[in-house]
Amino acid sequence: MKPSVVVANLYVKLICVYREKTTMFFTLAFPIILILLFGSIFMSQDNVNFHLCVQDLDQSKSSRDSVAALGESGKFKLTAVDPTVDAVQYLRETKATLVLVIPKGFERSLLRRKFFREYGETATLTYVYDPSSSSVPTKMAILSGVIAGANQEISGIPPFIKTVQKSILTKQYRFIEYFIPGIIAMSVMTLSLFGTANMNTELRQKGIIRKLSTTPITRTEWILSDVLYFFTIALVTTTIMLVVSWAVFRANLHLNLWLPAFVMLDVFAFVGIGMTLTRFVKESQSAAAAANAISFPMMFLSGSFFPVELMPGFLQTLAKTLPLYYVNEGLRAAMIFQDNAAAGHAAAIIGIFAAIVFVLGIIATKWEEGQ
Amino acid sequence: MSAKPDYAIEVEKLTKRYGDLTAVDEISFTVKKGEVFALLGPNGAGKSTTVEIIDTIRTLTSGKVSLLGMDVTKQKLDIVARIGVLPQDFSSFDRITVKETLQYYSRLFSGPHADIDGLMELVNLTDRSQVEYKNLSGGLKQRLGIALALVNNPEVVFLDEPTTGLDPRARREVWQVLEGLKSQGKTVLLTTHYMEEAELLADTVAIISRGRIIAMDSPGELIRQNANYEILTLQSADSKAFEVVRGMGFEPLPDQRRDCRIRVEHAPDLLRILSSVKDAGAHYLGLDVRKPNLEEVFLKLTGEALHDGPVAAKGQP
């Protein structure tokens, strides 16, 4: 292998992308859009504020105080529902998803329980809800927590089991900071996989590969130059993502040598997959479709957007077979937990995978035509 | 097959099949060092497949091909360092300039630095050295392609249809470059479906049709052996002229225009045809009598027109 040939290829590819302003713009803009979009979504999750409709049928001081306490919890934005309307009908006619109904006699039961120790007295709150709404279970879970606290307070006895939060991290991290390593891993994968498949099928369609096949360049030199090209672009886009996430969201992550190492392994793995794909697809449109078929499941199953723990058991098993999962895990271990052992373990797994697909890519790459 | 030192290329019973289709069917030929050899034939005849097997772009199905004494199926890397190729439908990276493209390909060969300025001068691209590939005209792109084929100072140059799709002026510009290569003593294997190109540039022409070589010699010898007659052309002739000619037992040759072209083997027949046409009151705009060219030889040998594939007994206006 001749380094001068690899450098010559790298130079030409970089010059081409630099001069193609539209490609350049979208290559750099895509990660910024991702960070801004998902960052905004997940930042607001830190201060989540659900819409809750409350129908107070009791209209007493106690019921009004309870409603006010719900509002003060900071979790809900409350809307009062007229006590004379039917809650079910109200839900059907409005875009609301959950109505909390406080029954008539709430205050009376509360006072009898509190002051006359009549423990048989209870008040039943009703959740009238739309089961098709995905936010309802979360709202009900929060409400149940609030109600459990209220019951505890009414009982007048201090709780036996208490909890205290103790993070293994010295610093308090927000969701956005957990999210950024996943976005870096995903965007490097997209760049490398789509870029390799598109670029090489286009060069083959144009006949440039045919011309290159009449020169002494080897498949290894060609693929290695692809890896270096996408690594260069990936470093630039990763830097931009980190700068934007710090500037806009004040995201604060640990930067160390693991970051370029995982970016390089990510590039190696997905350039190898891209080169293997190129062997089997003839046109750039087919290449994009094939790359989509690989990247989409990977994107959603490997924990870039959603924690793998939220998935059903078999999907969790599947996630652990995906290379992007280990890039995500490794980057989080390095950039958040500063856990070198975990980062090294993930790097070893993705490194073995990258080496295998890189060799497969070399084998699959075909200079000669018409076998 | 042992390569003789005076042969640059030796092809023996070369066959290429794609499934049931036989694109090249047991062809054999040799190209001497310093010779310009043209494979002449219509689209789909098997010219490009043959060249692409010799210059290592394609693999062969059977047969033997030796290039500069090396087996093309086994010594690709040694071979590509010593040849230059202009593939069919040549293309390059859109956003790099003429000079950058030449520098790039020069680096791929990793040999002594090529004389980039000299190459640009050879193909008359010096004043376009800073123009990006995508902004070049078709003729300029082909000239750049030829320069790229020379960037490693090759011993054998393969030019696959170097002037296809070019306008007549651009074609002549490319011919000038190819004549320059010929004068430098390069071995050139050229494919073309332009007779004029083969006649002008080639020392040896192999006529290829449906994957087989049906004639091979120098252009002059091919004409002498296969076309011992004159071509009489009645330009823009009316239908009566065609009737008269046919009535005399001559079959006009296929023609794209309204010209009535007749093979005449005996000189007295020329006068006889002209007299009969005149006596019948048939009209034509002008007449021409000349020796046949390679196109007529090709037509005679294959019954195919070079540009438009097989033709039936055409020629009637």
Image: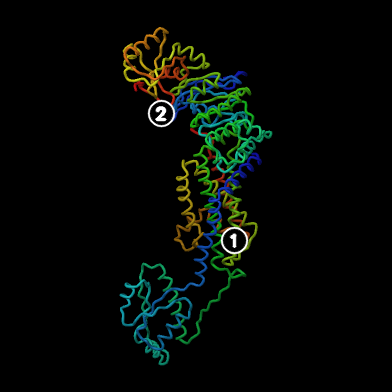
The one nearer the camera, B59 or B309, is B309
Quarter of the view holding residue A256 = bottom right
Residue B310 in view of the camera: no
Residue B288 in view of the camera: yes
Q: Position of residue B148 (x, y in %)?
A: 60, 33
Considering every residue shown, the one lying at the far right of the view is B112
Q: Is residue A277 left or right of residue B279?
A: right
| Residue A242 disc label | 1
The residue that appears at 60% across and 61% down in the rendered structure is A243
Q: Is residue B234 above or below residue B192?
A: above
Nearer the viewer's eye, disc 2 or disc 1? 1
Q: Position of residue A224 (x, y in %)?
A: 60, 44
| Residue B167 disc label | none
Q: Chain of mark 1?
A: A
Quarter of the view holding residue A262 = bottom right
CA neighbours of label 1 inside 10 A, class few (<14), some (14 to 19), many (20+): many
Q: Quadrant of the N terminus of chain B?
A: top right
Q: Which residue in the protein does label 2 denote?
A: B20
The residue that appears at 56% across and 57% down in the rendered structure is A184
The one nearer the camera, A27 or A197, is A27
Q: Amino acid at mark 2?
A: Asp
Distance (Cα) linking label 2 and label 1: 58 Å
Q: Is residue B12 above or below residue A147?
A: above
Q: How many marks?
A: 2
Q: Chain of mark 2?
A: B
The one nearer the camera, A320 or B270, is B270
Q: Position of residue A334 (x, y in %)?
A: 61, 60
Colouring scheme, one of rainbow, by chain, secondary structure, one colour: rainbow
